[in-house]
Amino acid sequence: MTEDEMMEQYNRQREEMKMFLLDKHSANVKSISDTLEKCGYFLSEENFEYSDPVGLTVCFKNLVSILAPELNRDKDDLVKLTQLFQSYEKKAREGYLYTNSYMLMLTPLLRRGMHPVNNWAPLFVTKIWGLDLEGIEASVALDYDRAKLDVSDYGYAELDTWFGAPFDDDISSIKDGISKLRPPMDIEQRIINFIFNDKYSLDIKWDTKGKIKTFQALEFSNENVLVEFQDNTYYPAKYIHAEFDLESNSFRHFDGAVHFYTHDEYFSRRDLDFNFANKNTNLVKAKSQKVFKLDGKISKEIWLELTGHFLTGNPLIVEYFTGNYPQHVLERLSRART
């Protein structure tokens, strides 16, 4: 069987599964369709999609605003977790919010490759879902254009995982300054791309003003990594911003976002550091979508864990926090050099 024939068979099987689930969950399909029709909107078969990791979904622009107008979205397009957990049933399956006829989902920017048909990237969603919210106001972005219709606890298992980095330093003692981390240059590029999961660089900056110490991180992927955002194709870069209160010895604010660079913006920015980029008045500011936000009294442990898992699969963040790569990366680099 040729590759084209295999792909044709896969697409046919996926379409068959979609039709099977549309029939099986016809009551949920009718409920969603009726809700939209009351607002003057109509669905067709093209509005329904199926993938093995996610299941059966209905896709419609600003769908969540129609299904759940009571949800309060802030200026960053985020919704408080407390409101979500009060309005929807939270179960063991992370990243999904249950009703009898549909499930809301977190933003696809938290999925593998930031693609809506994939499973969650390990393990940020798991960590945020199990977060102790005492003293913390947490907000997240949803998948505002889709809802899952095959309501169940079934999850598509993917066995690979990611471990965060230990970090014992006293935050208050960290000197202000910038760091730019890159994978080793002495190994063939295709091997480095595999070992470092297509990560190009990691920019870090610490800056202190008065009693607040600010942390920033910006993760660039290689030029082959592209995503769709607002009907255009961009180069994505994950961004983290956090503010550490030197008096309370805890973080008071912590958020993560994805920046979206055009071709020219990407190649202009990726080899700069934070200081040079900020001084370059010709550099166009990238589009941005915030993914999560925490305010309150946030421990170093929570900041460290969520930072490591938001930048999932990137050995450079482990190198920054520990001074070395994870053991499995060291072993692969050693084999590549022999």
Image: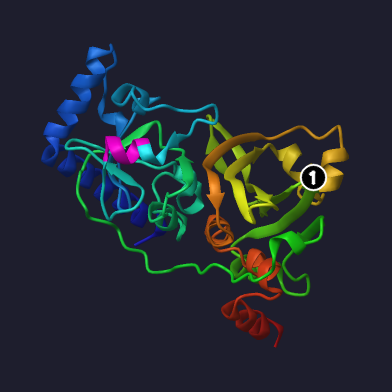
- Residue 87 part of the magenta-drawn span: yes
Measured as percent of width and height from the top left, residue 179 is found at: 79, 59
Question: Magenta part of the protein: which range?
Answer: 83-88
Is residue 185 visible to the viewer in this orientation of the structure?
yes
Measured as percent of width and height from the top left, residue 298 is found at: 55, 52
- Judge by depth and name the residue closer to the eye, 177 or 248: 248
- Residue 243 part of the magenta-drawn span: no
| Residue 189 falls in image quadrant | bottom right
| Residue 326 falls in image quadrant | bottom right
Q: Would you say 276 lies left or right of 247 here?
A: right
Q: Return the residue at label 1.
A: 209
Is residue 181 visible to the viewer in this orientation of the structure?
no
Q: Residue placed at 82% from the left, 56% from the top? A: 176
- Judge by depth and name the residue closer to the eye, 225 or 95: 95
Q: Is residue 332 above or below residue 177?
A: below
Measured as percent of width and height from the top left, residue 243 is found at: 66, 47
Q: Residue placed at 85% from the left, 32% from the top? A: 282
- Judge by depth and name the residue closer to the eye, 331 or 72: 72
- Packing grade of label 1 (10 A; few <14, some 14-19, many >=20) is few
Q: Would you say 122 lies left or right of 265 here?
A: left
Q: Would you say 77 lies left or right of 14 here?
A: right
Q: Residue placed at 33% from the left, 24% from the top? A: 70
Amino acid on which disc 1 is placed: Lys
Location of the N terminus by quadrant is bottom left
Q: Residue furthest front?
A: 247
